[in-house]
Image (tube, helix red, strand yellow):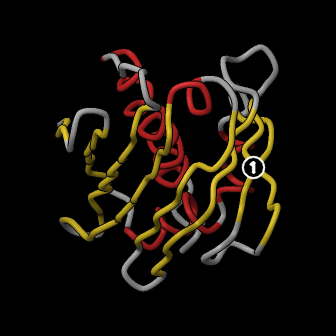
Amino acid sequence: MIITMDENTKRVTQSFVTQVSPSRMFKALILDSHNICPRLLFSSIKSIEYFEGDGDVGTIKQINYIEGGEIRYTKHRVDALDKEKFVCKYRFIEGDGFIDSMLEFLTHEIKFEGYGQGGCVCKITCDFKAKEGVEIKGIDIELVKHKPLGMYEVVEAHLKAYPQLYA
């Protein structure tokens, strides 16, 4: 779903259901992403490094992507983190390619809520604003939408295959 907030600011919301618990998804994708994502997503993520902090609010992380891709790196800052409600909000603060050339800002809020018998609903909200004079097209929105979902689906499959991880 895409909701226009004003002429240049957009909100993209999406969700998916998984059979993995909210706590396990949160631990893997939020608290330990710097370890698990480069291992599982080695075809796109080279490494994730902390620049400041240790994962809590104010932490700045840099994601380094494999060479030859459309983006070399992105940095983001954790703006909110609730380990009991399984919620994280972060803002991209630097990068190359799409983010720096087209966007004034890009934020993600991720919530993992219990669903069914031991599963969860992962809700992702992306807010972004185009730089003055830049028109955001459908293909650009698809990039914002599908990158996080693809990563989450890979981690979900891994957690289902190894139920002892992050238990």
Q: Is residue 114 left or right of residue 145?
A: left
Which amino acid, by three-letter code, is at mark 1? Gln
Residue at screen point 47% across, 62% down: 25
Q: Residue at x 58, y 66 (%)?
A: 78
Q: Quadrant of residue 113?
A: bottom left
Identify the image quadrant of residue 87: bottom left
Give 27 or 163, whichever is nearer the viewer.
Answer: 27
Residue shown at 50% from the left, 34% from the top: 103
Q: Position of residue 73 (x, y in %)?
A: 74, 35
Image position of 85 with respect to 165: above or below: below
In the picture, measured across the screen, residue 127 lies left or right of residue 23, that is left
Which residue is more in the foreground, 96 or 9?
9
Does dot 1 land on a helix, a strand or a loop? strand
Above or below: residue 116 compared with residue 41:
below
Residue lying furthest bottom = 84
Question: How many circles with numbers are drawn on the protein?
Answer: 1
**Residue receiving disc 1:** 62
Give percent across and percent down for residue 142: 36, 23
Q: Residues within 10 Å of mark 1 (few under 14, many from 20)?
A: many
What's the residue at 50%, 76% (across, down)?
Answer: 81
Residue 144 in the image: state x and y as whole percent.
43, 32
